[in-house]
Amino acid sequence: MKNNIKPKVTLVGAGPGDPELITIKGIKALKNASVVLYDALINRELLTYVSPETKLVFVGKRKGMHSFTQDQINELIVKNAFEFGNVVRLKGGDPFIFGRGSEEIDYIESFGIETEVVSGISSSMAVPASLGIPLTHRGISESFWVITGTTSERKLSKDVCLAAQSTATIVILMGMSKLKEIVEIFTKFGKTDVPTAIIQNGTTANEKMGVGTINTIVTIAEQNNLSSPAIIVIGEVVKESAKLRAYFEAVKVESSSYRN
């Protein structure tokens, strides 16, 4: 370790993609970092807050393209903390919402290294909000579920089946590869007409979106070439968005003309 600096690791949530949706505390941590290990989904503009002397290490993981395994990332964090002192682990969204942040903290602290967590704004809330979708709404949805679409075993989470039986708003992260399975489950429980939105690269300049219902969303996703990273929002609250209301009004008119 250089200059006998006490090692410390700070996990910083980078937010959903918009570089302005990071906390002031997160920015301060980046400015004070000796090393920053950053993920694939973070906005590169955030790295402009880092000192020119700071060491930058890309440890991003994409589906089928892992530059480092989680074990290797853990080892890199500890190695750099002992060598350089002040390490920031910059993670997309919030480190503790499907970000494996607690696993990293457990490993780091096993070496006696001081840790700190700076929460980030999760895409599960910020992305729907950016389109005016309220996850809860009086008289419509009393709660919301945030579920991972793909488990560590690469299977669809069993919680999706439970969620499909509720009246809650359902937000599914990492679920695009399981979209057809998700639709099948909601269809099984008679939820074919439930409003559904898919938002890819939410809150960024590359944002893409598809809106429909359970029985149309697979086709809409294909027509709009929607893929990961994206979130899926399922629930009546989707049509409460002023920004999306025109779509549902158009569908209502079209459906009415068919019946007549």
Image: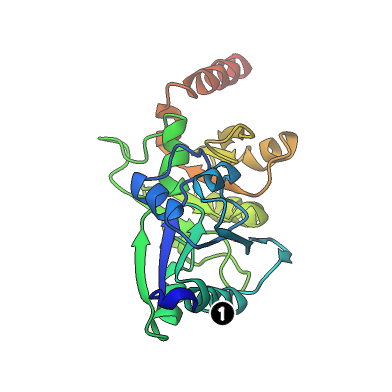
Question: What percent of the width, then of the height, locates residue 57?
Answer: 62, 62
**Considering depth in this image, is 71 or 62 the residue closer to the camera?**
71
Q: Quadrant of residue 5?
A: bottom left
**Considering depth in this image, is 48 or 225 the residue closer to the camera?**
48
Question: What percent of the width, then of the height, locates residue 237?
Answer: 40, 35
Left/right of residue 45 with respect to residue 62 in the rendered view: left
**At 74% from the left edge and 34% from the top edge, which residue is drawn?**
223
Question: What percent of the width, then of the height, locates residue 72?
Answer: 61, 77
Left/right of residue 60 with respect to residue 161 in the rendered view: right
**Image position of 140 with respect to 41: above or below:** above
**Considering depth in this image, is 249 or 54 the residue closer to the camera?**
54
Q: Would you name the residue on which mark 1 appears?
A: 75
- Is residue 191 at all visible to an observer of this figure? no
**At 68% from the left edge and 46% from the top edge, which residue is drawn?**
227
**Considering depth in this image, is 32 or 225 the residue closer to the camera?**
32
**At 54% from the left edge and 79% from the top edge, which residue is drawn?**
79
**At 58% from the left edge and 75% from the top edge, which residue is drawn?**
76
Q: Quadrant of residue 56?
A: bottom right
